[in-house]
Amino acid sequence: MIVPLSHILGFSSALFVMGLACVLARRDLIMILIGIEIMLNAVGLALVGASAFWQKVDGQIFVIFLMAMTSAEVAISLAMVVYLRRQKATLDADAYDGMKG
Amino acid sequence: MTWSDLYALLPVLVLIFGSTVLLMAGAWRAAFSTMVAYGILFSLAAAATAVFHTPGSHDVAGFFLIGGYSRFFSILWPIVAALTLTISFRYGADRGFSGGEYAALILFACAGMVLLSSASSLVSLFLGLETFTLALYILIAFHKGSPLGAEAGLKYLVMGGVATGLLAFGIALIFAATGTFHISEVSILDASNGQFHAVTLFGWGMLLAGIGFKISLVPFHLWTPDVYQGAPSPVAGLLATGSKGAVFAALVFLLGNLQLSRTPLANLLWVLSAASMLIGTLCALRQNNLKRMLAYSSVVHMGYLLLALLAGGTSGHTAILFYLVAYAFVNLGAFAVVTVFSSCATEPQSYEDFKGAGYRQPLAAAALLVFVLSLAGIPPTAGFMGKFAIFYAAIETGYTGLALIGILSSLVSLYYYLRPVIIMYMSGDSNTPSFSMMASEKSVLILCLIATLILGVYPGPLFDVITGILP
């Protein structure tokens, strides 16, 4: 491996933290979902790097599973976005505060 | 994948086959009750398959370990799914749920729970968890006419997405440090100093945080009351019992062969358990909504289960499994009571709505009394035996402080559990129309009542079964 594992892990951790920050800081629902996607892609990067380091395909197989799972999740979350938009005509996460306590 | 692998996974295959058939058949607009009835049939068929098929101990492609332990949960979760479907007949028909999708999603979620309970690799653990989480995203927002349902679905979706990210990143870090996904290999400590590598430890921390979201441990519990309140009652019942129980079944296997007390993870779990018991109790005290109260009570119960997990060993793990069975019947019963009181348009949740309900519906009110007594841990109910086993295991292994917190919080819990029941027997307004309970709802209530009382009076046989199947 030309790139050391520590660099890959460092880069994917940075990507993960950026995704998490996006989820926490943005109030637009679409941006929150993009943040979650970035987090999951950081996971994929870490897995591929680790897989190359250990010379094992297990990590790459998990990445394929992860991609399939992510696409299912995106399908559900975008359907949810359309549904919420019809209910309240806004995608601001702060508008959905009907329950408290 | 060989024939023997497929044979070992037979109960799951029955569930997935049934779910696919129902999804297809739903396209022909069959009546809600017909589809739900077929859903119940398929889940009971899966449970019966698990009872009668004996593949022995079998490792499926290094992903799933099929044996007594997984067989136990392949019987329990389909029964929970069947009970959930049975209480939905009137509730779903009144709200215009489409039967094919509803029954198919519940069966699919159940398949995910069974897979999670038999996972022997971090990959299959992740996939099983996601299988039922994805189905629950839809089920929580299933009632199209309810704004609260949409909000609950949104909150579960965002929280669930973050939890998935944390869990997956934790698994990736563990893989990067150890080079394997197999649970029995990742939990081996570094031989040189009897500790984990720093990256592994960080991975375990993130994995536990992700799992903490799914089973709503404090401080990851914020979604729980809102989702319980907004979700349809039968779905909330499944969420409270099956999804959390399946995660605990996987946790027992995951942390079972790890020497927890030698790692810093034990301290982390100690704090999570104490915080869940204390903060869950404090928040439950000020609730005036039955479903929100049940949500905070589930936070407290997850704290008890975590205490048993910390105690570990045979006695701790036996206590967890017994508690999961007892908790499944008791909590499903409590959500069945909420379902019974729901009318066409509304779902009564506030304590005010239940005034005088004890005289209108004596059976449902009496059942709720038994269920909350069991949740509070009063003999002769199943909850008492479960709590006794947990606190016994905890004191035996030296977690006296946590056990004291647990006993204290279950004493305080009597106050918030009994409040709705007392309100039920206060005189209410007489203009609330009385109604007759459906036979299906009555049978679920009676079944849960019998299970609660029998497990409380005569728990021996179940304890024997559990001791025999522990991994």
Image (cartoon, grey):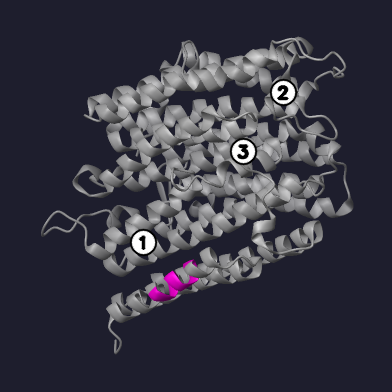
Left or right of residue B210: residue B109: right
Rendered image quadrant of residue B416: top right
Q: Residues within 10 Å of mark 3 (few under 14, many from 20)?
A: many
Left or right of residue B153: residue B23: right
In the image, residue A12 sits, relative to residue B173, either above or below, namely below
Residue stretch rendered in magenta on the structure: A14-20
Outermost residue, left side: B192
Out of B346 and B16, give the one closest to the viewer.
Answer: B346
> Would residue B109 be visible to someone looking at this image?
yes
Rendered image quadrant of residue B169: bottom left
* x, y percent for residue B394: 29, 28
Q: CA distance from mark 2 to mark 3?
A: 25 Å
In the image, residue A98 sits, relative to residue B162, either above or below, namely above
Q: CA distance from mark 2 to mark 1?
A: 51 Å
Residue tagged 3:
B238
Q: As shown in the figure, which amino acid type bears the numbered disc 2?
A: Glu
- Identify the disc placed on residue B197: none
